[in-house]
Amino acid sequence: MHINSRQLRYFISIADLGSLGRAAQALHIAQPALSRQLRLLEEAVGTPLMERNARGMALTPAGHSYYQSARKLLDDSVAAAARAVRAAHGEVGHLNLGFSEIYAWHETVLRALQTYRRECPDVAFTIEAMLSGAVTQHVLDGQLDLALAYTGPLADDSPLAAVPWMEDTYLLAIHEDSALARHPPSRLADLNNEDFILFRRDQSPQLHDLMIRHFHQSGFSPRIVQEGTTHYTVLGLVAAGLGCTVIPTSAERRLPPGVKLIAVSDLDIRMPINLIWRHDNPSTLIPRIVELLCGRGQGV
């Protein structure tokens, strides 16, 4: 059985107008041609859908039943076409984003999500919180569309596209009731006898190694007594009074109770954060979110 949308449209028009002649005029088609299309539709369905009466054309009982389904099919077809056009323009769909929780509170991220939602209310977001190493791997695996991450230099043949977003610096996070709060360290080496908290290396190997290398160059060999999986799990351990840590300055937007951040003269870790996605990601939503987060679309 072959039925096309044109035949459905013709059938609905005849039913709505109650006349082959009026429907032919409205559709700009010759009446005999319209009558033939109706016959072909009835043959395909397998039963008469309309019958002539003194007023013109009327639906048969089967026609009444078929009319409802035909109307829904035609409406669904129009809606599907409109949705496809909107999807092609990045106005509908779903984006999977990943970044550390500290950047979920960054004003640029909040403003970008608010603007995108206002412009395209049919675009939905899922946000996963994890550190740079884990989030980068999720982008490479195709589990995330975009991420904010420290990646280090990317190889020329990397499957990842990257746009600079910001450069974060680091501060020392301590508990406000600790001895370090009463006698702040002047340099990293002053922390050699302190309990130190850090994220697990497997969560972001490049960032972990960057930190440890910087510590050793500054004469600091951290005594790591606790580990977390994200920046905020680490800050939670600091809030519990279990030690100190270093944390991106952006974390100051939302600190747990009891935690304060202080500068240390030789704590000079600079972490460039990129917005990353796969070159081969076909999502039409990516260009707009790149523009909103970074102020431009870059080779998307």
Image (cartoon, grey):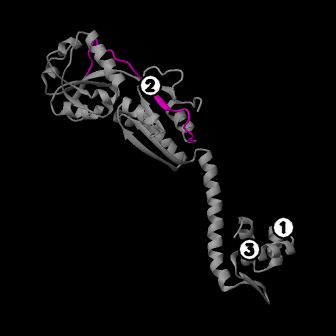
| Marking on residue 293 | none
Callout 3 amino acid? Leu
Q: Is residue 184 above or below residue 103?
A: above
Say few, some or many: other residues with alpha carbon within 10 Å of mark 1 (under 14 / 14 to 19 / 20 or more).
few
**Most foreground residue, 46 or 203:** 46
Label 2: element kind: strand
Callout 2 amino acid? Met
Q: Which x, y percent locates residue 186?
A: 21, 12
**Most foreground residue, 269 or 157:** 157
**Toward which corner of the image does residue 246 lie, by quadrant?**
top left
The question of residue 65 being in magenta is answered with no
Seen at 29% across and 31% down, the residue is 231
**Most foreground residue, 142 or 100:** 142
Please report whichever mark, 3 or 2, sits nearer to the chain's N-terminal start. 3
Q: Which residue is mark 1?
A: 28
Which of discs 1 and 3 lies nearer the camera? The answer is: 3
**Toward which corner of the image does residue 215 lie, by quadrant?**
top left
Q: Quadrant of the N terminus?
A: bottom right
Please report whichever mark, 1 or 2, sits nearer to the chain's N-terminal start. 1
Seen at 62% across and 57% down, the residue is 80
Q: Which x, y percent locates residue 63?
A: 68, 81
57 horizontally vs 160: left or right: right
265 horizontally vs 49: left or right: left
Q: Which residue is mark 2?
A: 166
36 horizontally vs 145: left or right: right
Which of discs 1 and 2 lies nearer the camera? The answer is: 1
Say few, some or many: other residues with alpha carbon within 10 Å of mark 3 (under 14 / 14 to 19 / 20 or more).
many
The magenta segment:
262-283
Q: Which residue is mark 3?
A: 41
Residue 77 visible here: yes
Q: Is residue 26 above or below residue 242?
A: below
Seen at 62% across and 44% down, the residue is 89
